[in-house]
Image (cartoon, grey):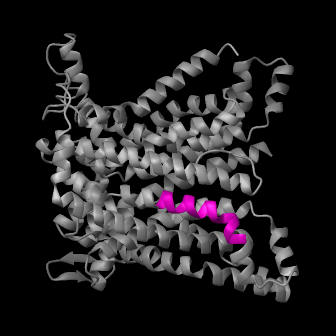
């Protein structure tokens, strides 16, 4: 508000124009996103009985979520899975982004990026299911190894496990990790690297002391982009885990729709959202520190 | 440059990992066996015929198409408003408003699908294709805005001022100067939103009521092992279609960059 009035009449009309222009989108997002989220917050503080939602704000649902065995276990599993997926995806993606950024000719880069992104615009459901086809009991790996005579009976460690869920998700979010890291690597001034080597640093040390710190914002963006959607993934536990390894999204569905306990379901959703927000803020602060260190 | 070969081999191995599931699609779509396993049993196009004969698939496909077209148009329009406002104007609360609009990009989809569901049910809106569209527009708008913001950002402000000086009104300047220059961005946004909407599952699954769309249909088919080969055939067709759409989107995006005289930095995101 202050900014607008300081600039006088012109600034005021610019602010008004800007607000007017953005209002359709802002109103849409308020009605269909902010309002429902607010409603869920309110629901989570109510009690759901057979008679319907009852008022009286209480933290009962949150206490139930935080002390309940199932909810806590599933929350932990979701966190573990998404943390592992994030770690694996970002570690595997970094060298690829590095290769495209540093070892590919400028005019070929977008072709490589295009090649990397193509698999991600094909049906997510089918991609997840194909991993089940690859890793399943009668899957590609097992039947392939058996027909080659390498193993006598199907390996069971690769199917319906946390590991295969991590593998599937690491594949599903690979491009989302590569792109931000690539963008931050592209921004690095190449003369800094030459300077490092001119001053007698080895290639590896230049990478460690110059390239890696400078690309950290991209790494942190990648971490967030992978971590946030995987923690709420619904399809992979359903298809790969065979419904036997539910994560928090499946729990929210079960409580909200099958048990029809909207209050408890809302509390679980809000808890998950709070965890996501906490992790995101932690990483964003980390990012800020890196940016500050640079300037 | 002695690390070059290792990195290159690694990257190619990684690309194989990325493409591995997709390469399997045509193999099993044309494989003459009800079981999805090796060794392959011979060539058949029966699965395509079986897929084609399924009436439900066509209903689901029509629904998906309707939703994807409508959502991509609305999301792109909302994206144009937001992108234009954010690149051209300064206004109070800009960060917060843009943050809210971009929020669906960083919120687990399940959470806002459930939030939307709870509210729609409470307000008494019957679940239908319409409610799926409401959700998809919300989901696609951030992507549309991201694409369009870069299109609007590369606009040269002086072109607009020149038009004003030559006596054009803001409306006609927008129509004659700005719109043609950001057109490639708009087309690319439409295509990306269309693809996202077509592929989206969680919102369609929970907000659709008893209406089936393509992704929900596919999910349902996975429950019956006998139906899986036909889904593979369907998946193969979908992959081909989305590769075509993406190539077109990429073409327009590059043309847009060339038009405004920018440099290609690559990538959609």
Q: Does residue B127 belong to the magenta stretch?
A: no
Residue at position x 86%, y 20% from top? A198
Residue A281 found in image quarter? bottom right
Q: Relative to residue A148, is residue B84 drawn left or right?
A: right
Q: Report the label total.
A: 0
- Figure check: B231 above or below A66: above
- Figure check: B78 above or below B186: below
For this rendering, which residue is in front, B192 or B4? B192
- Figure check: A206 above or below A270: above
Q: Is residue B269 visible?
A: no
Identify the image quadrant of the N terminus of chain A: bottom right
User: Residue lying farthest top?
Assistant: A149
Q: Does residue B190 belong to the magenta stretch?
A: yes
What x and y, as percent, mark residue B189? Answer: 54, 61
What x and y, as percent, mark residue B13? Answer: 47, 23
User: Residue lying farthest bottom?
Assistant: A9
Q: Main secondary structure of the magenta part?
A: helix
Residue at position x 26%, y 30% from top? A135
Residue at position x 33%, y 74% from top? B131
What x and y, as percent, mark residue A93? Answer: 53, 34
Q: Is residue A112 visible?
A: yes
For this rendering, which residue is in front, B153 or A79? B153
For this rendering, which residue is in front, A5 or A114? A114
The residue range painted magenta reads: B178-193
- Figure check: B250 above or below B82: above
Residue A171 found in image quarter? top left
Residue at position x 29%, y 66% from top? B63
């Amino acid at each position: 508000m202050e900014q607008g009035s300081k600039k006088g009449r012109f600034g005021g009309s610019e602010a008004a124009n800007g607000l007017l222009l953005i209002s359709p989108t802002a109103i849409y997002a308020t009605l269909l996103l902010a309002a429902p989220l607010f409603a869920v917050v309110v629901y989570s503080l109510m009690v759901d009985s057979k008679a319907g939602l009852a008022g009286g704000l209480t933290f009962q649902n949150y206490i139930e979520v935080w002390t309940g065995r199932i909810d806590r276990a599933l929350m932990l599993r979701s966190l573990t899975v998404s943390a592992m997926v994030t770690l694996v995806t970002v570690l595997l993606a970094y060298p690829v982004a590095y290769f495209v950024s540093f070892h590919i000719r400028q005019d070929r880069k977008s072709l490589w990026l295009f090649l990397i992104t193509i698999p991600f615009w094909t049906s997510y459901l089918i991609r997840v299911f194909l991993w089940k086809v690859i890793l399943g009991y009668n899957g590609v790996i097992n039947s392939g190894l058996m027909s080659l005579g390498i193993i006598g009976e199907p390996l069971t460690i690769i199917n319906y496990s946390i590991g295969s869920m991590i593998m599937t998700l690491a594949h599903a979010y690979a491009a989302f990790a590569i792109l931000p890291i690539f963008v931050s690597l592209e921004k690095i001034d190449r003369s800094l690297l030459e300077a490092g080597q001119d001053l007698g640093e080895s290639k590896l040390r230049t990478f460690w002391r110059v390239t890696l710190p400078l690309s950290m914002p991209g790494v942190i963006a990648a971490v967030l982009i992978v971590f946030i959607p995987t923690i709420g993934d619904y399809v992979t536990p359903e298809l790969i885990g065979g419904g036997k390894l539910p994560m928090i999204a499946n729990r929210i569905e079960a409580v909200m729709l099958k048990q029809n306990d909207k209050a408890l379901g809302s509390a679980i959703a809000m808890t998950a959202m709070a965890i996501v927000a906490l992790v995101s803020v932690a990483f964003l602060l980390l990012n800020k520190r890196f940016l500050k260190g640079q300037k | 440059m002695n690390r070059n070969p290792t990195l290159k081999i690694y990257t190619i191995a990684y690309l194989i990992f990325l493409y591995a599931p997709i390469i399997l699609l045509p193999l099993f779509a044309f494989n003459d066996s009800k079981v999805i396993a090796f060794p392959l049993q011979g060539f058949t196009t029966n699965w395509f015929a079986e897929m084609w004969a399924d009436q439900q698939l066509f209903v689901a496909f029509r629904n998906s198409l309707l939703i994807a077209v409508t959502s991509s148009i609305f999301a792109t329009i909302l994206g144009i408003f937001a992108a234009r406002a954010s690149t051209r104007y300064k206004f109070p609360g800009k960060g917060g408003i843009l943050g809210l609009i971009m929020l669906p990009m960083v919120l687990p989809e399940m959470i806002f699908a459930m939030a939307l569901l709870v509210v729609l049910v409470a307000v008494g809106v019957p679940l239908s294709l319409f409610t799926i569209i409401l959700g998809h527009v919300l989901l696609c708008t951030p992507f549309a805005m991201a694409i369009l913001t870069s299109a609007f950002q590369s606009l040269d402000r002086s072109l607009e001022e020149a038009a004003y000086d030559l006596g054009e009104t803001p409306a006609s300047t927008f129509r004659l100067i700005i719109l043609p220059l950001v057109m490639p961005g708009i087309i690319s946004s439409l295509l990306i939103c269309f693809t996202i909407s077509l592929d989206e599952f969680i919102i369609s699954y929970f907000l659709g009521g008893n209406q089936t769309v393509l992704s929900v249909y596919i999910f349902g088919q996975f429950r019956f092992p006998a139906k899986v080969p036909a889904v593979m055939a369907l998946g193969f067709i979908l992959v081909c279609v989305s590769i075509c759409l993406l190539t077109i989107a990429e073409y327009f995006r590059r043309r847009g960059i060339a038009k405004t005289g920018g440099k290609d930095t690559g990538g959609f995101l």
